[in-house]
Image (cartoon, helix red, strand yellow):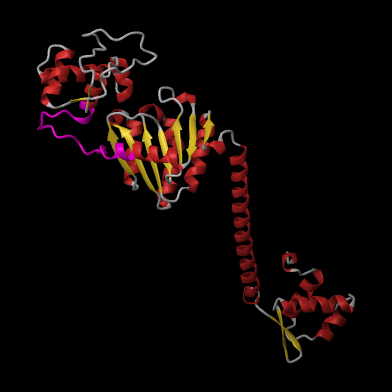
């Protein structure tokens, strides 16, 4: 039991003897124990070193162990703290070397980009970047990227950043109010100090860390396609500008809307703009993150407020009222590859609103 203190059986026996016979002398111990004198002297020296025995007028007096060993315990504690600090420093050095190795081996790393093709790889990179972030994290979060699994994985990362004093800013779709899970997450983030706002549509999923590294979706139309990590001032300047432009027009979470005005809400303006681009109702649903019935109900309400009997007339009236303004770049816009032909006038993909924007 006393071995951790460096006491063998002889030393322990000597201490017990001294307890029973306070004021014993070294000569008494040498006569009492059938052991080599050198072994007895060595054990006595160890007990004196630990202050379990103290010399008093040529005798050996036992000391209360907690008092005698306090210095030893303090010394051991200091040594443990030193070893922990040394371990932490070694670990940091290993992590830095490993990071340099991964960066050197990663495809496209030298070109300022790296493709991440699986959810596990994306989360691992988010975890690493969040751990290194010191100033801010900026996010654009379309509806199709806010699965329950993704929110569960992102929660500790956002929380740890905020606890470290990192500013966390997130932009959601206004349709977030239709998704209880995502809305609860957004409100939680706002409560612990994050900045949360909403806009009618978002172009892609994006996370920017300290304005030096960004993760963004490879294909905004297909979240399963993976993400790409980009670095470099050229890339980041444009991505940060995109975020700042969107943040400037966000509506604070749970700010509510003013029902006393006939002006369109931000999401209604965006709906008119998307219709003007010739998108189908289904495509508009995906952009806004709402259901098909909701989109058609909103279109019907807009037409009623505009006093229009057709979508073509609704577009014209919206421009007349100043809800939309003509876009100078609308002249000869090429069709997207997915478009087989231009939509007919008056159809669900009407061009009546073609060439207008908010």
Q: Residue at x 18, y 25 (%)?
A: 324
Q: Position of residue 206 (x, y in %)?
A: 41, 35
Q: Is residue 234 above or below residue 68?
A: above
Can I make out residue 316 in this image? Answer: yes
Q: For this rendering, which residue is in front, 216 or 171?
A: 216
* Residue 120 placement, left or right of 72: left
Estimate the x, y position of residue 193 in percent, counting from the top left: 34, 48
| Residue 261 drawn in magenta | yes
Looking at the image, which is closer to me, 211 or 34?
211
Q: What's the residue at 19%, 30% (across, down)? A: 265
The quadrant of the rendering that contains the N terminus is bottom right
Q: Please report the bounds of the magenta region as a residue range.
A: 243-269
Question: Which image quarter holds the C terminus?
Answer: top left
Q: Position of residue 74 (x, y in %)?
A: 61, 71
Indicate the quadrant where residue 223 lies.
Answer: top left
Q: x, y percentage for residue 114?
A: 53, 34
Q: Nearer the viewer, residue 4 or 189?
A: 189
Q: Is residue 210 left or right of residue 15?
A: left
Q: Does residue 226 lie above or below 96 as drawn?
A: above
Residue that extends furthest to the bottom in the rendered view of this protein: 57
- Residue 345 vertical placement versus 214 (above, below): above
Q: Is residue 45 above or below residue 142?
A: below
Total labels: the figure holds 0
């Amino acid at each position: 039991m006393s071995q951790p203190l460096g006491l063998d059986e002889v030393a322990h026996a000597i201490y017990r003897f001294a307890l029973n016979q306070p004021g014993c002398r070294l000569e008494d111990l040498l006569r009492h124990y059938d052991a080599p004198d050198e072994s007895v002297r060595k054990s006595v020296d160890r007990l004196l070193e630990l202050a379990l025995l103290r010399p008093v007028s040529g005798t050996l007096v036992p000391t209360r162990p907690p008092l005698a060993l306090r210095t030893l315990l303090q010394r051991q504690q200091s040594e443990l703290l030193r070893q922990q600090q040394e371990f932490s420093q070694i670990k940091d050095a290993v992590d830095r070397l490993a990071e340099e190795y991964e960066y050197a081996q990663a495809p496209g790393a030298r070109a300022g980009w790296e493709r991440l093709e699986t959810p596990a790889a994306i989360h691992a990179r988010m975890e690493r970047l969040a751990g290194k972030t010191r100033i801010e994290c900026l996010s654009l979060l379309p509806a199709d990227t806010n699965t329950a699994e993704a929110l569960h994985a992102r929660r500790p990362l956002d929380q740890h950043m905020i606890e470290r004093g990192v500013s966390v800013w997130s932009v959601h779709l206004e349709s977030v109010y239709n998704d209880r899970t995502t809305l609860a997450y957004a409100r939680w983030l706002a409560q612990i100090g994050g900045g949360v706002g909403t806009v009618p549509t978002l172009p892609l999923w994006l996370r920017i860390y300290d304005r030096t590294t960004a993760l963004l979706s490879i294909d905004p139309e297909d979240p399963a396609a993976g993400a790409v990590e980009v670095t470099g001032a050229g890339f980041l300047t444009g991505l940060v500008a995109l975020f700042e432009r969107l943040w400037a027009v966000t509506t604070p979470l749970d700010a509510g809307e003013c029902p006393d005005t006939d002006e369109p809400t931000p999401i209604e303006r965006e709906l008119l703009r998307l219709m003007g681009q010739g998108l189908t109702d289904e495509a508009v649903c995906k952009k806004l993150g709402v259901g098909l019935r909701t989109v058609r109900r909103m279109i019907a309400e807009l037409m009623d407020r505009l006093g229009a009997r057709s979508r073509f007339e609704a577009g014209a009236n919206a421009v007349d009222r100043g809800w939309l303004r003509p876009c100078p770049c609308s002249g000869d816009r090429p069709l997207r590859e997915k478009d087989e032909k231009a939509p007919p006038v008056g159809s669900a993909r009407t061009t009546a609103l073609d060439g207008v924007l908010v």
